[in-house]
Amino acid sequence: CRKYSERPVETGKSNRILAAAGIAPTAHNYQPFRIYVLRSGDALNKIREITNMTFRAPLVYVICTVESEGWVNEFTPEFNAAELDAGIVITHMMLEAKEEGLESLCACWFDNAKVKETFGIPDGQFPTALISVGYPAEDAHPAKLHTKRRDMSEIVKEL
């Protein structure tokens, strides 16, 4: 969703979205993420000064990865699952938002350092994504590329 109504998201719905994050599977169940909830007018104004990718949603979650807590594959030590785990968490949150009758958008286009500084995010936590959540505006519509998909034969190979 790239256009939200001004209607606030009820606390119960926000809490259920967070609960969905809490039960998302992560590698070795390490849960190497932190979530910051931006709901107040002040917090929303601050994030809107950093990026327009929140599309004026009344609720924004900042998803941070904590690489030091991520599971590392002993066969491939350069692979840390923290970002993969954050992606799973984000998916769970977005699916729950839809279940709650809300729309959402995940964005990674923002100044990570500025988000970290503005919201006092501690060292060791990296702002990975923003999830904007809210009720869609009456004239909201998906981005033009939203439904564009590759043919399955290009992305699936059976061996």
Image (spheres, helix red, strand yellow):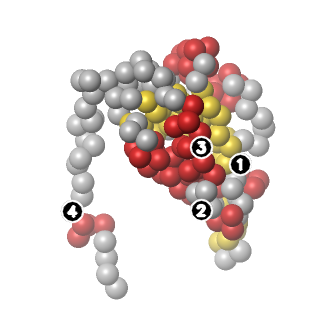
Q: Kindly identify the residue that appears in the image at 64 percent across and 55 percent down.
A: 82
CA distance separating discs 4 and 3:
34 Å
The residue lying toward the viewer, choosing from 7 and 93, is 7
Determine the CA span between mark 2 and mark 4: 29 Å
Give the mark nearer the N terminus: 2 vs 3.
Answer: 3
Task: Give percent across and percent down for residue 70.
Answer: 70, 58
Residue named by callout 4: 151
Q: Where residue 90 sits in the image (x, y, percent)? A: 52, 48
Residue situated in front as seen by the camera: 134 or 156:
134
Q: Label 2's element?
A: loop
Residue at 76% of width from left, 43% of height from top?
Answer: 124
Mark 2: amino acid: Pro
N-term mark: 4 or 3 = 3
Q: Residues within 10 Å of mark 1 (few under 14, many from 20)?
A: some
Task: Decide if residue 70 is on the left or right side of residue 147.
Answer: right
| Residue 124 visible | yes
- Residue 85 vs 115, above or below: the answer is below
On screen, residue 74 above or below 91: below
Q: Are marks 2 and 4 in contact (CB under 8 Å)?
A: no
Closer to the chain start, of discs 3 and 1, is: 3
The Cα atoms of the two marked residues, 3 and 1, are separated by 18 Å
Q: Which residue is mark 1?
A: 66
Q: Quadrant of residue 41?
A: top right
Residue assigned mark 3: 18
Sequence order check, earlier mark of 2 and 1: 2
The mark closer to the camera, 2 or 3, is 3
Q: Residue at x 67, y 48 (%)?
A: 33
Which of the two labelled residues, at mark 2 and mark 4, occupies the earlier sequence position?
2
Using the rendered view, name the quadrant where residue 36 is placed.
top right
Tag 3 secondary structure: helix
Position of the C terminus, as image quadrant, is: bottom left
* Mark 4 secondary-structure assignment: loop
